[in-house]
Image (cartoon, rainbow, N blue to C red):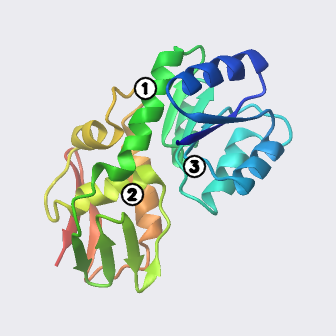
Amino acid sequence: MKSILIVEDEEAIARVLSAYLRKAGFHVTRAADGRSALEAFEEAPPSLILLDIMLPEIDGFELLAQIREKSSCPVIMLTARDGIKDRLAGLDGGADDYMSKPFIPEEVVARVNAVLRRPSQWSDGSRKRHFGSLFIDYSARSIFLNGAEVSLSPRDMSVLLFLAERPNQICTRDQLLEHVWEMDYEGSDRAVDLSIKRLRQALSHWPDSEGEIRTLRGTGYQLWTT
């Protein structure tokens, strides 16, 4: 049974989400503040986290940053702060999805299922590929650069695998949104740009002579390799 950690300080919201998720077959753990959420996460890492931003002790953005330092556990942010700056801050910080309150509980469950499907989305047997010093194991969804494993969020991993399956081909933002984000995405397509930015930072030690993620202005992105 997959487990969901709900980090929400509003008891009524947390209770409703718990009921719907349990009905959908998930084991649910709840935390009402950032500090207890971090303790719960470290004690029993969940399959996915539903994370509010405005929390006591440690706010959602800081909690997300601490989680991303040690884990690629999927995170969906649920918050009343619906401004584009907050959305981009969450996505840039490594969140896998962002939903604003008020929300429909059934949609939250649908998005949880969609995000949890992503890890197996690109598995196809035992395909492995070298791009110079960059090694990609598609079935294990693992990336190594110069022999060291590269830690990526599930969404950033899916973006890189999508591009790596199509080396030297141009992939548009719409293609990435459709195939990686899967569901109708309410936010700006800048989410793709932010994911690419994080990937470039993660692969900053990949020699340009071996490959790079290129931006084709007005068109999209390309994993260019020699």
Q: Earlier in the sequence, mark 3 or mark 1?
A: 3
Residue occupied by mark 1: 110
Whether residues under marks 2 and 3 lie with C-beta atoms below 8 angstroms apart, the answer is no
Q: Kindly identify the amino acid type of the residue bearing the numbered disc 3.
A: Gly
Residue at disc 2, secondary structure: helix
**How many other residues sit within 10 Å of disc 2, few (<14), some (14-19) or many (≥20)?**
many
> Which mark's residue is nearer the viewer, 2 or 3?
2
The answer to whether residue 129 is above or below residue 17 is below
Alpha-carbon neighbours of circle 1 within 10 Å: few (<14), some, or many (≥20)? some
Tag 1, which secondary structure? Answer: helix
The residue beneath circle 3 is 93
Q: CA distance from mark 2 to mark 3?
A: 14 Å
Residue 220 vertical placement versus 214 (above, below): above
Q: Which residue position is annotated with label 2?
A: 157
Who's the residue at 31% across and 71% down the image? 137
- Residue 10 placement (x, y as % from top left): 77, 21
